[in-house]
Image: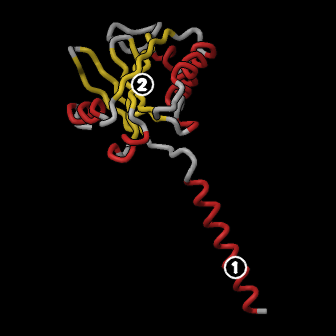
Amino acid sequence: MWLMREVKKIVHIFLVLILMGGCDSKKKEYAWKTGTTEYEGFPLLLRLPVGLDYDSLQYQYPRLFLVTHTLDIVQQSGLPDATYNKGLIEFDDAMVTLFSNNNSGLTVLVETFCGKRIYYMYVSNSADTETAMKHMQKNYSDCRLTWQLKNDSQWGFIRKYAKDYGL
C-alpha cells in the first residue's frame, strides 16, 4: 500500500515535469530594455529584448526583415506625438510578435527616429513575410508600412548595432 502511494507520487511528479517541459517549448517571452540616445542631432529611441543568444539564434533565423512604419503625427524632434503613440500600442504589439507567435522569427530591435519606427526582425527561411505583411496592411490600413528582407545568417547587423551603441 505504501509503495503504491509512493509510485503514484512519482508518476504525478513525472507528469508535472513533462507538462512543464511542454510549456517551455512555446514561444519565449523576453524582457525589453529601452534607451534614448542622439543621432545626427535628433533623439533616437531604442527598444530591444534582453538576453538573446545571438550565437544559437542565428542558425534558426538567418534572414533580417525590416519593417518601417512612417509615423503620421510627430513632434519637431521627429518623435511621435504622445497621444498618437499611445494609439499605436496594439499595432506595435502585433508588429513585435508578428513572427514570434508561431516561432518563425523574433524582433531584435525597435528604433524610433525622425518620424519613423523601424522593426528589425530575424526570421527563419520558411517565414512567409509577404503574407505577414498583407495581414498587417489589412488589419492596420491606416499605418504606412514598407519592408525589406535581407540575408544575414551571421547576425552581422544586430551585432554591429549592439557594439556601436554599447547594448
Q: Secondary structure at mark 2?
A: strand
* Label 2 crowd bin: few (<14), some (14–19), many (20+), radius 10 Å: many
Residue 51: assigned label? none
Q: Residue furthest front?
A: 125
- Residue 130, placed above or below residue 102: above
- Lateral position of residue 89 relative to residue 53, left or right: right
Where residue 18 appears, as percent x and y from the top left, is 62, 64
Residue beneath the point at 41% across and 9% down: 74
Q: Nearer the viewer, residue 10 or 29?
A: 10
Residue located farthest toward the right when viewing the structure as drawn: 1
Residue 45, horizontal then vertical, whole percent: 34, 24
- 40 or 59: nearer the eye? 59
Crowd class of label 1 (few under 14; some 14 to 19; many from 20; radius 10 Å): few
Residue 15 visible to the viewer: yes
Amino acid type at image mark 2? Phe
Quadrant where the C terminus sits is top left
Q: Secondary structure at mark 1?
A: helix
**Amino acid identity at mark 1:** Lys
Residue nearest the observer in this picture, 30 or 157: 157
Could you tell me which residue is drawn at 24 percent across and 21 percent down? 38
Camera-near label (1 vs 2) is 2
- Identify which residue is drawn at 70% across, 73% down: 12
Q: Say which residue appears at 35% left-offset and 27% top-offset.
A: 151
CA distance for labels 1 and 2: 48 Å
Q: Position of residue 35 (x, y in %)?
A: 32, 31
Q: Which residue is mark 1?
A: 9
Q: Is residue 21 left or right of residue 124?
A: right
Residue closest to the eye, 34 or 16: 16
Is residue 51 among the parts visible in the rendering? no
Residue 132 place in picture, x, y as percent? 56, 22
Q: Quadrant of the N terminus?
A: bottom right
The numbered mark at residue 65 is 2
